[in-house]
């Protein structure tokens, strides 16, 4: 597959992910025009524009307020993800959901960061907050059978480019195992459960477009696999704590918290190793330097 790697190496990760998300949006608009997806294509286009315009203006404001630079590519990615997981606008209330989701996603990049480490995936934390305070959240409408081939093709390229194949597989396998185990205990048909999680959920889009985000994932390889397993377990539709059923965005936000502490531990370990090296070098005779 060296030819594929050579092709992928011509693009940065940012460029590949943006092309992936734009491609998915184009496909959804075409399928909406053809009546394959249950959305008004013009509403989809309008919703995307609302999110992009609001997000860009918000990002400019927060960058000015915090006297910080920002990568336009990461802004585009977060906003396009929102356009693909929040249902297209149909009422006036939907406008405010789009407005606040885009604004909160940009705000999180500046406010919810510690020691220059991002805490949460911007799109995920934005829809968590809108669910809490607006009682409106993401529908994850991109997770349909008609979109699955396009999600998979581009997503696999992203996983290969980012060397995140093990992370994605750890997540996906965990989701299926958890779903099967709970289905067995509940007496649910396994084929039905597998079909729903594959064709009627955001499983693969979530894995490729959001879980792989490097800024909110652990650096350490072992921690990265555990991260995939943890989020996969929480992502499973049947997992709940009492009457609280988790959503994909909540699963990712919880995983982001684990990733943050994993990074802190990793940094501390690296710093201690470097300090020990420096200390050793200091007391060693000149001839040994």
Image (cartoon, rainbow, N blue to C red):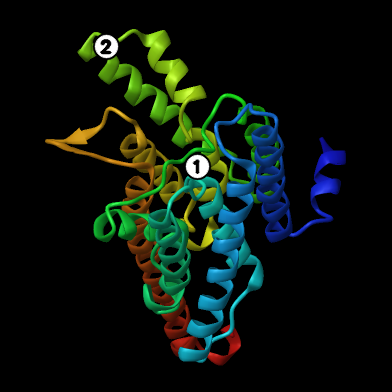
Question: Measuring 64% from the left and 47% from the top, which residue is drawn there?
Answer: 42
The residue closer to the viewer here, 42 or 191, is 42
The quarter of the picture where the N terminus appears is: top right
Q: Name the residue under label 1.
A: 206
Q: Which mark is residue 104?
A: none
Question: Measuring 36% from the left and 68% from the top, which residue is drawn there?
Answer: 264
The quarter of the picture where the C terminus appears is: bottom right
Q: In which quarter of the image is residue 225?
A: top left
Q: In which quarter of the image is residue 156?
A: top right
Crowding near the residue tagged with mark 1, few <14, some 14–19, many ≥20 C-alpha atoms within 10 Å: many
Tag 2 secondary structure: helix
Question: Measuring 51% from the left and 41% from the top, which residue is drawn there?
Answer: 207
Q: In this view, does 247 lie to the left or right of 286?
A: left
Q: Name the residue under label 2.
A: 184
| Image spot of residue 130 (x, y percent) | 33, 58
Q: Is residue 230 left or right of residue 8?
A: left
């Amino acid at each position: 597959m060296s030819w594929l790697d050579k092709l992928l190496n011509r693009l940065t990760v940012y460029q590949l992910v943006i092309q992936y998300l734009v491609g998915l949006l184009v496909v959804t608009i075409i399928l909406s025009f053809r009546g394959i997806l249950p959305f008004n294509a013009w509403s989809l286009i309008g919703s995307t524009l609302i999110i992009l315009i609001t997000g860009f203006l918000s990002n400019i404001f927060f960058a000015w307020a915090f006297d910080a630079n920002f990568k336009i590519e990461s802004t585009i990615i977060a906003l396009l993800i929102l356009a693909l997981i929040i249902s297209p606008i149909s009422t006036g209330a939907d406008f405010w959901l789009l407005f606040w989701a885009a604004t909160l996603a940009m705000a999180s990049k500046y406010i919810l960061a510690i020691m220059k480490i991002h805490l949460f995936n911007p799109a995920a934390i934005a829809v968590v907050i809108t669910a809490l305070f607006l009682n409106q959240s993401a529908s994850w409408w991109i997770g349909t059978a008609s979109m699955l081939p396009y999600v998979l093709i581009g997503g696999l390229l992203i996983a290969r480019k980012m060397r995140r194949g093990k992370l994605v597989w750890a997540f996906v396998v965990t989701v299926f195992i958890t779903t099967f185990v709970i289905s067995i205990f509940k007496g649910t048909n396994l084929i039905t459960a597998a079909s729903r999680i594959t064709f009627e959920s955001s499983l693969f889009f979530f894995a490729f477009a959001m879980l792989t985000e490097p800024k909110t994932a652990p650096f350490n390889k072992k921690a990265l696999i555990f991260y995939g397993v943890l989020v996969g377990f929480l992502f499973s539709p049947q997992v709940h704590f009492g009457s609280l059923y988790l959503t994909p965005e909540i699963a990712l936000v919880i995983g982001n918290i684990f990733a943050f502490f994993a990074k802190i531990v990793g940094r501390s370990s690296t710093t201690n190793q470097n300090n020990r090296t420096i200390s050793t070098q200091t007391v060693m005779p000149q001839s040994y330097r």
